[in-house]
Amino acid sequence: MEAAARVLRLFRLTVPPVFFLLACYVFLGEHVFGLAYVIAKRLKTRARLFLRVFYYTSTIAVAAFAHVMLLYMCIDEASACPPMHMKERNCLAITASAAVYCGGTLLIERWANPMLDLGQPTGVQTRAFAAAGVLLTWMCIADQQLCAHLLLLLFTSRRALILLPRIERLYTLGIKGYTVIHMSRILTRACNGIPKLAVATVAAMAAL
């Protein structure tokens, strides 16, 4: 329990640095990543294709593993108000790892997108929505809210199903619908939770 409390305290203390990193991710223009474009021009077609396949394969595999483990370790009851396991070692470990993975993927992809020609959307609005979702996840973990797991499930499912857009769309709609139900239960005091974080989670999911 003491180790879990230290990890949760660490998340609370790192909110400002994470905000700064995500602000850089959002507002730094493409010219800052000029080296990535230079490397892209020097990469041979086969090398770029190999690296692109490796990047997608590795990120999809990690996202799928994190998604399954989040469901197994942290959400083990089909209920609008499932019990929280955030202070349990296994749940906290996969939650923290998935959060770092989601945040790290955003930062790495600013380089990988032009370098490997991933074709991912890179507009300021898209980056701002993604950054807001990751920062909100960080805050929800610090406050031990189920919304953190729901946001992580959304992020990891989108990455895991990136090559299956129709299934991904239906699955993420299911996650969003469950989040709305969970928010309504919190607002009516039927579930324990912080109302403002629950509302913010629904708003963030609507934008993502």
Image (cartoon, rainbow, N blue to C red):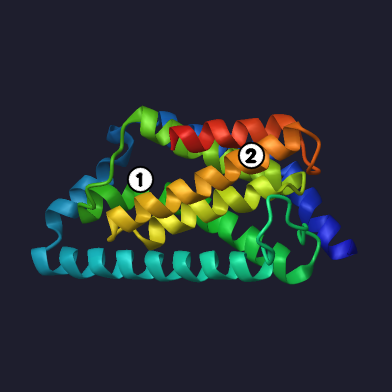
Decide which of tag 1 and tag 2 comes sooner along the chain: 2
- Residue 200 percent across, percent down from the top left: 61, 31
Q: Left or right? Give the position of 104 relative to 90.
A: left
Q: Left or right? Give the position of 121 relative to 63.
A: left
- Residue at point 44% right, 50% down? 172
- Residue at point 73% right, 47% down? 145
- Residue at point 60% right, 37% down? 201
> Which of the image's four quarters has the C terminus?
top left
Q: Indicate the amino acid at tag 2.
A: Pro
Q: Determine whether the residue tagged by mark 1 lies in a helix, strand or loop.
A: helix
Determine which quarter of the picture holds residue 25.
Answer: top left
Residue under numbered circle 1: 110
- Residue 73 percent across, percent down from the top left: 67, 69
Badge 2 density bin: few <14, some 14–19, many ≥20, Cα 10 Å? few
Residue under numbered circle 2: 17
Badge 1 density bin: few <14, some 14–19, many ≥20, Cα 10 Å? some
Determine which quarter of the picture holds residue 30.
Answer: top left
Q: Left or right? Give the position of 43 relative to 123.
A: left
- Residue 24 percent across, percent down from the top left: 47, 34
177 versus 207 height, above or below: below
- Residue 34 percent across, percent down from the top left: 26, 41
Spatial separation of the CA atoms under disc 1 and disc 2: 18 Å
Determine which quarter of the picture holds residue 48.
Answer: bottom left
91 versus 125 height, above or below: below
Is any atom of residue 152 visible in this view? yes
Q: Determine whether the residue tagged by mark 2 lies in a helix, strand or loop.
A: helix
Name the foreground residue: 95 vs 44. Answer: 95
Is any atom of residue 18 visible in this view? no
